[in-house]
Each structure stands twice: as structure tokens, then as C-alpha cells.
Amino acid sequence: MKKIDKIENLIIQTIKKLLKNKPKGHHDPIFVGNEKKYLNRCISSGYVSYVGKYVKVFEKKIASYTKIKYAVATSSGTSALHLILRYFNLGQNDEVIIPSFTYVATANAVTYCGSTPNFVDIEKESLGICPKKLEQYLKKNSKRIGSYI
């Protein structure tokens, strides 16, 4: 079995477990495996943020899995978004299209770089950016849309 097939099977199994254990709210945590056991170990270690043994293990496993030299865990989703946007040299006069249904951190990370967030409506089914709305937005706001669509 190819590595990608194993990943797809793992994703499908996880989704099936998640559907059985539907969260009560939009942000409720979902535990389907050993998460509670690992969280308790982490809490007992005294390191529950962005440093410590478990962070280093996580970074090494991610680096190994993705076959890269280093991986860096961040203290929050906001800092992760900010870091990746800085990596791509986002700055003044840049604009970023983001879904209208998002957490404030998404727009904040863009503005931290001095850039402008542009919201595009989402699809009800996927909660991701609606391709039709994106096309409309780009046609209205982009000078070079003809070469991309």
C-alpha cells in the first residue's frame, strides 16, 4: 500500500470516528484516540505551551514525516499564520484573499504584515471560499484575471 493510500485511509477512519462523536458546538474539542492520555502527560510535565519535551518530539516527528530538516511549532495559530506570511515576504501593498467565515487571527496575521485582508464569501457545504464568489471577486478586483481563469 502506498504512503498516500495509508494517509487517505487514516483520514477516512478519523472522519468516521468524528461523525460518530459529533461535537456539541463549533469549537468543541474532539478526542478519538490517545489524546487525553497524552494531554495529561504533558500537563503533568509542567510544559503546556510552546516549550518542553513534547514540543521537541512533535517537531521532530513532523520534520521526519514531511522529510524536511526542521519543523517549528508555534505558540498559537495566529503566530503560525504570521510566520508563514512573513516567510512569503508579505508586506505593504499586498492583499490576501481569506474566507469570510474565519477566526479573527486570519485577518490579524495579514494586517501584522502591513497587508490588506480581502474577504470572500464561503460555501455553505464546505465552509471554504466559494469558487464562484472568488471568480466574481477576482473579475471585479483584478487587472490580470484573464490570464488565470
Image: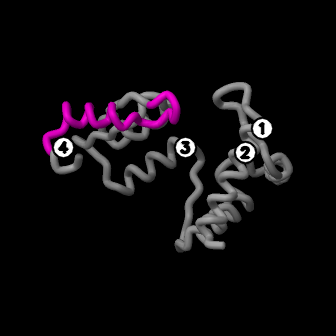
Q: Picture coordinates of residue 36 (x, y %)?
A: 83, 46
**What residue is at 56 percent from the left and 64 percent from the top?**
71
Q: Amino acid at mark 1?
A: Lys
Q: Nearer the viewer, mark 2 or mark 3?
A: 2
C-alpha gap between disc 1 and disc 3: 27 Å
Q: Nearer the viewer, residue 120 or 123?
A: 123
Instruction: Give the residue drawn at x 73%, y 26%.
Output: 24
**Which residues, given as a range, are shown in magenta?**
123-144
The numbered dot on residue 145 is: 4
- How far, Cα to Cα, is label 3 from label 4? 31 Å
Residue 64 belongs to the span the image colors magenta: no
Say whether marks 1 and 2 touch (CB < 8 Å): yes
Q: Earlier in the sequence, mark 2 or mark 3?
A: 2
What distance separates the C-alpha of mark 2 from that of mark 3?
Answer: 26 Å
Label 2 to label 4: alpha-carbon separation:
39 Å
Query: Mark 4 or mark 1, which is nearer the start of the sequence?
Result: 1
For residue 10, side relative to residue 97 (left or right): right
Q: Where does residue 89 sit, x and y in percent of width and height?
A: 31, 54
Q: Secondary structure at mark 3?
A: helix
Whether residues under marks 1 and 3 lie with C-beta atoms below 8 angstroms apart, the answer is: no
* Quarter of the image where one finds residue 5: bottom right
User: Counting residues from the N terminus, which is met first, the one under dot 1 or under dot 3?
Assistant: 1
Judged from the image, the secondary structure of the residue bearing numbered disc 2 is helix
Identify the amino acid type marked 2: Lys
